[in-house]
Image (tube, coloured by chain):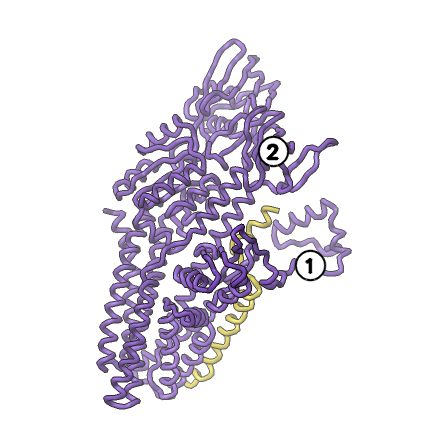
Amino acid sequence: MEGAQDEFCCHGCELAWTIIHGAGLQRYYDERTSFAPRPQPARFSWEAVPVQTAPDGTANAKLMIDGLRCASCVWVTERVLERMPGVCDATVSYATGRTTLRWDPNRVNLPALAGTISSLGYRPRLLGEESSPDRELLPRVGVATFAAMNIMLVSVSLYAGWFSSMEPRFVVLLQWASLALATPVALWAADPFYKGAWGGLKNGVLHMDVPIAIAIVVLYVHGFVATLTHRDAYLDSLAMLVALLLAGRMLESRGRRRAAEAATALAATAPATARRRTEGGVETIATAELRVGDLVDVGSGQEVPADGELVEGGALVMRSMVTGEATPVAAGPGDKLLAGSLVEDGAVTLRVEQTGADTMLGRMASDVRAAADRGIGVTSADRMAPWFTAATLTIAIATFLWWWMAEGVGQGIITSVAVLVVACPCALALARPLGAVAGLGAAARRGLMVRSADPLLSMANIDLAALDKTGTVTEGALEVVDACNEAIRIASGLERYSVHPAATAILSEANRRRIPISRATNVSEVAGEGISGLVDDRRWKLRRGDAGSVQLESDEGEIHTIRMGDTLRADTPAAIRSLEALGVEVVLLSGDHVEVANGIANAAGITRVFAEFDPQQKRRWIHERRSEGRKVLFAGDGLNDGPGIAEADVGIAMGTGAASSVLVADGVIAGGSLKALLAGIRAARACHHTIRVNEIRSIVYNVTAVAAAVLGFVNPLVAAVLMPLSSGVVIWSASRIESRVAQAEAA
Amino acid sequence: MNGIFFLLPIAILLGLVFLVLFIVAARSGQFDDMDDPPERMLRD
């Protein structure tokens, strides 16, 4: 502010201040009377939502559904909606929550459909609204974790008190402290489970939330009564269970939100504004306003706003973001330019042929969106949930009736509570998230960050790995492959002040070989053609040759060729050999020329190569392999790999790659080494195995414990000891995933 | 040992203060976007 002492919290603020003052904008702060208004979210009613009517009389609309927790939620929502009279079909995407509805407007309307979705416990909203599901879950996770940690502290004292005979008044204090801490967990933090269970029950569907909700309620009521009667309450396991389940749920919802943002990010890669030629001059307009046939100017360092034909000028154009070619291409009149490619040097005018969603870039964005909407399968725990719940409830009721007949109401209640407590699916519900967290950690320590549990588990079954060339198998940067020292010396002088990638490569090569940079005079650069100048009193001309090489010619006819290329990452061949040893077939998919792709594949040890594939072809190729039943992993780095990454069973992006490919990917390779893929597959296999074993273990535990409880051998106290024990076994075996992965690596 | 009768509630209350602060922060959208803000100033 004016007059205040100039002190800044950081360089960023100082920079912002300098920019504002430099532009003479500080008067804004003097003249404003209140803070700038922020756009308020508009309140809206479902009646106002635009509904499209198809020729056959059906209406359709797209909305987003928040609060989808698992694949079975998707299944429930679709089924319930489709059972409503008048609804033709309903498809819900698990990854994004995007929902497509088609209905008969004479029999049902959108407000009614939205009401049904709300009654299931999910939140429908208009597509395109801001979403922030974490705001609801995060405080619950906080409360549950806080309570769990504190109850643990209290419980440890209680357990210790058993052995060293604590005074009863201390025991009472600690028990009441536990109850006080557990109450908000059971009454408030666990709310999502109650809502989910209630929504499911109302519609006659039993999913995983139902047994969890029952267990929480029974545990809490039991704990409450136990505290009043000074018996052991075991509220610690209640709080721990809720905290772990909530945290797992929050991590999953974050992952899904990122995937949804990726498609938006991809579309945003085209520049927001374009400079359109008018009769009088040039005007700057929003890219969205461009029309086919417009003439657009694109200068050096700018991105092309639309697909079109170059009509004037010439430039080096870097198309790697769109097509995957590593080297810039010289473009002149008559050449096609693609939206999203970068004009490296030179200036061009193009006639717009496709805009927005019709451009290559736009089609890629919609491919990504479609693949993310495809959804995933239902997990085994979810499939078991209905049977599990139904069986538990039936057994508990039967037990109650039987003991009531035999020994009276009191014994009936005690025994059936024991059944419900030992039947708590804690171990079953924990098997997957804990195994996944351990597996994700093991992979992350080896350089592969996987977004969430589902893609990691699908990595276990991968049998085909398709790799992109530029930036994935190779370093992704242009380098001098072959040239004599003299050529480098002369070229470095000419290229000294140039910015395009070939110049950077030549200069860094000169630096690496410790060649002094020559002095060049009279240097002139013609965009799209080359550079000429005087070095040692001889006239030299540097031109682009074929297939990524540069020709250096003197006026006397002396010619040097500097071969440039993309070099293989050092550990790629070893990684590919190991992948094949794990039974994974490796294939190279490249947008580059056949010879270049074959050369790299040979060096890397890949036998199957598909070159000159555009993003759509890569996606289609992966789609075809998937429909043949192959489990496909695709690793790529560029924007052009987005559709392939989204289409594959497991899509992996290079951490150094384009932001949108990182966003849409299931996992990211952090260190740039393909060995991370190997670690990922090993971690996934260990994880898969452990989760299977744990699921079987927890079912065996539940079956035996329930049987014992039914017969009256288990009282609520023993049950409460057994339950943490079963969860403990699950936690212990999940913690062994890391050492399993290490063993697999050593073998 | 009698100290525990007031020390335990005090400890839990102290923890509660931070929990409430955390909830207020989460409610006001402090944790909505963990990736964007550090990069935003670079983009402007």
Count of marks placed on residues: 2
Indicate the colour of chain A. purple
Picture coordinates of residue A331, whole percent (x, y): 55, 26
Disc number placed over residue B35 in the picture, else none? none
Q: Name the residue: 32% across, 70% down.
A: A425
At label 1, which amino acid type do we have?
Pro
Residue designated by label 2:
A352
Residue A243 quadrant: bottom left
Viewer-proximal residue among A441 and A537: A441
Mark 1 or 2, closer to the camera: 2
Q: Name the residue: 67% across, 54% down.
A: A7
Residue at the right extreme, as displayed: A31
Indicate the colour of chain B. yellow
Residue A485 is at least partly visible in this image:
yes
- Chain identity of mark 2: A
Disc number placed over residue A37 in the picture, else none? 1
Q: Earlier in the sequence, mark 1 or mark 2?
A: 1
Q: Name the residue: 52% across, 23% down.
A: A492
Viewer-proximal residue among A167 and A708: A708
Q: Residues within 10 Å of mark 1 (few under 14, many from 20)?
A: few
Picture coordinates of residue A726, whole percent (x, y): 28, 69
Q: Residues within 10 Å of mark 2 (few under 14, many from 20)?
A: many
- Disc 1 secondary structure class: loop
- Chain identity of mark 1: A
Viewer-proximal residue among A63 and A492: A63
